[in-house]
Each structure stands twice: as structure tokens, then as C-alpha cells.
Amino acid sequence: MKLKRKNRIILALDLLEEKKALRLVERTKNYIDAIKIGYPLLLACGLGIVRKIKKIAKKPVIADLKLADIDNTNLLISKKVISSGADYIIAHGFVGGQALRILNPEKTFLVVQMSHKGSEQFINRQTKKLCAMANQLKVYGVIAPATRIGEIRKIRKWVGGVILSPGVGAQGGDAKKALKAGADFLIIGRSIYNSKNPERVLKYILNSIQPV
Amino acid sequence: MKLKRKNRIILALDLLEEKKALRLVERTKNYIDAIKIGYPLLLACGLGIVRKIKKIAKKPVIADLKLADIDNTNLLISKKVISSGADYIIAHGFVGGQALRILNPEKTFLVVQMSHKGSEQFINRQTKKLCAMANQLKVYGVIAPATRIGEIRKIRKWVGGVILSPGVGAQGGDAKKALKAGADFLIIGRSIYNSKNPERVLKYILNSIQPV
């Protein structure tokens, strides 16, 4: 299933309980373009959760594996997750191109910058080089946080692929500014699943970003 | 369960089938000090595999998660895996100290260098800084490949904790030299589980490294 740009919102399903997770997918599916899941949910519920999510949402699932191993292990893990129904995976660029070339670029997003404070210690100093590598590998897109608008603008100049931006809402990023700066999709988690009325939150965000 | 230095060999259980994996543990348990497992096995068999391995081996299990996320997600994943019986986890240092401070340092190993060719592009340029961070965080130990003996020698000077070295055997590292240079344990996978006689391979390695 291909990622299509319509609502420009990706739900980060950072939950641990299957029932809660699937209920949230059901409630939000009409306001989002894809669902991002990670290891906490995969380890708690098993790989079967991917197909259950897709059956409800009929939207692509992005597995946020933050792959960061040698080529052979990266391939083993991504094969396993993609064969379970995931449409895209997220990998770390800092392990270098040789460990990533083995992945299917059309199904891969590379982390080129992170949002937490400690990320300035190592990874965020390499963003330009990581973007160049993303272009070389011809990956589908990159992950760059919405918390630093100036950085998204630079990354938009540096990479050709799609940009997914986490950090809107709970982490303080501004949705409209992030899209204007060049992000294609916003990844939003906490402010949706911590709300008693996730539909209302999503409608509010959708309203606030239209027209960009 | 604490890691104890006796045979100085850690079995890397990079297999996907539960039966095969548990049989290998049974056959090798007397020659090894711990078992390292990763996501391929965890995703294929579920978290229950950890306790099954420990029941047979009565040795510590190190979960090679290559954790590389923000603090909250790192904590969620490591909690899940440690509560399933894993004694140690492996995390990446390059996400920065702030994302790692949340982990229990006594149960954490940090990757400070990798063995594949592409690792020179980013991560291996930061080894000295990553070692300094490992000391600051007071983690139990670090991962440094046996494929570059000179690097192990440097890392031995830079870090106070235990050094685990993958890369012996299939990747070309020399067991005895790695231990002499400062590695505390060798992580060995392929040359054991690809052999028809893993016991014989282990006896051969044990013989070749005694006395260091």
C-alpha cells in the first residue's frame, strides 16, 4: 500500500495494549494518511498486530524500527516486518550506507535528525551528510523533527524524498509551520492518544493546517 | 543473573527458528558464559523465548536491541524486554546521553564501534567520544569489534567497563588477539551455529584462547 498525501497526518501508535490501539485506529482512520508503529507495540502484541491495524484502517503502516545494525541483521529484521504487512520501515542512517544498501529503498525512511536534546551530541551534527546518503540510496523519505523549523527548511533543500516530521503537539512543534517549511507529513502521537476526544483533536489540527 | 567471566565466549543466537535455537543452546551451554539474542529471534518467536533459553542454559541473556530512540521509547522497549527475563540490553550511544540516562546502567551495554565497512562513515569516527559517554553513564560495558585489534586496545584504555567483542570467526577476527588486546568476552555466532558440530568448534576456540 502506497503512502498518499491527503490529510498529511500520520498517527504514531505508541501504545502497548492491542485493544486500545485498535480502537484508536478505528476512531481516527478517516483523519489520517498512515499509522506508525514501533517496537513497544510489536513486542507487546506480536507481528500480527500489523495486519489487524491495516484491516481496520486500510492505510499504510510504517514500522518505526530505528534499524541500526549490520546489513545482514537489518535485512532479516526488515524482511520479517514487511512480510507481516508493514509497508515502510524506518532505519538509522548513521550506521552508514553499506549496512542500508541491502534494504528496499522504496520502502525505507532514514532518520537524518532527531528531536530530543541529546541528539545534538552526535546525530544532528551529521544531518547534511545523512541527507546526501539518503539521496544516494534513493530512499523513499527521511525523518526530521518539526521542533526545529529552520532545520526542516534546510533538509527540504538537501533531500529529494518525502519528509515525515514528528514533534508536533506534545513536543511543541507547530503543525502549519512544519508543513510550510517543507514537511510532507506530520507524525502525531501523544496529543491524539492522550486525548479523550481524538477525533476533535484531529479535526482541530486538520483545520489549523488548511490551506497550507 | 550476572555475567561471569569463565569461558569468555558469548553465543550469538542469530537464528529464526525456536527449535533450532533451543537445541543449539542445549548443546553449547557448557562452553559459553551468556547468550546474545536479537530482534530476528524475538520477532519470530515472541518474548517468551528469553525464559526458555534461560531455563536451558542457566546463563544470562543479553538482548541486542541496538536501542536508538528517544528516552521514553528506549525505556518502554528495554522495560518490556528486561521484564521478559533478559539480563542486559545493548543500546547505541550515538543517540546521545540524554536518551540513554533513563536506562539502568548496570544492565546496559553501549555500542562504541561497529565491524562493518560502512561504520567508518559515521559511528567509528566517534568512538572516543562514545567511550567517554559510556564512562559518564557508568554502563556495564561496551561493544567493540574483534576485527580491529588496535581499536580494542584503544577502547580498553578509554572505558572502565566490560568489553564484548563480536567479529571473531566468520568475520575474520582473531580470538586470542582480541582477548589480549583487552576484550573480556568474544561474541561468536556463525562459526558455531553454521557448524555441524558446534561443541567441537567451541572446544577448539576454548583451547586456542587458553591461557590468554
Image (tube, coloured by chain):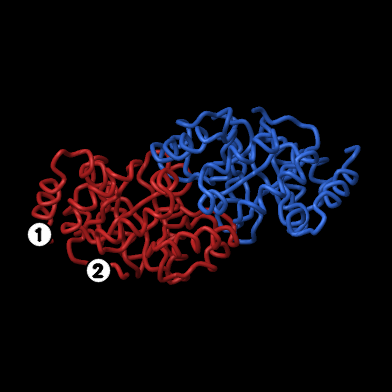
Chain colours: A blue, B red
Closer to the chain start, of discs 2 and 1, is 2
> Which quadrant of the view contains residue A33?
top right
Looking at the rendered structure, the kind of residue marked 1 is Gln
Residue at 45%, 59% (x, y): give it.
B81
- Asked whether residue A175 appears in the rendered view, the answer is yes
Circle number at residue A75: none
Answer with left or right where residue A209 lies relative to residue B170: right
Q: Which residue is mark 2?
A: B4
Answer with left or right where residue A165 lies relative to residue B197: right
Answer with left or right where residue B114 lies relative to residue A201: left
Q: In terms of secondary structure, where does tag 2 sit?
A: loop
Circle number at residue B210: 1
Q: Position of residue A140 (x, y in %)?
A: 62, 31
Q: Position of residue B167 (x, y in %)?
A: 28, 46
Residue at 29%, 46% (x, y): give it.
B21
Q: Residues within 10 Å of mark 2 (few under 14, many from 20)?
A: few
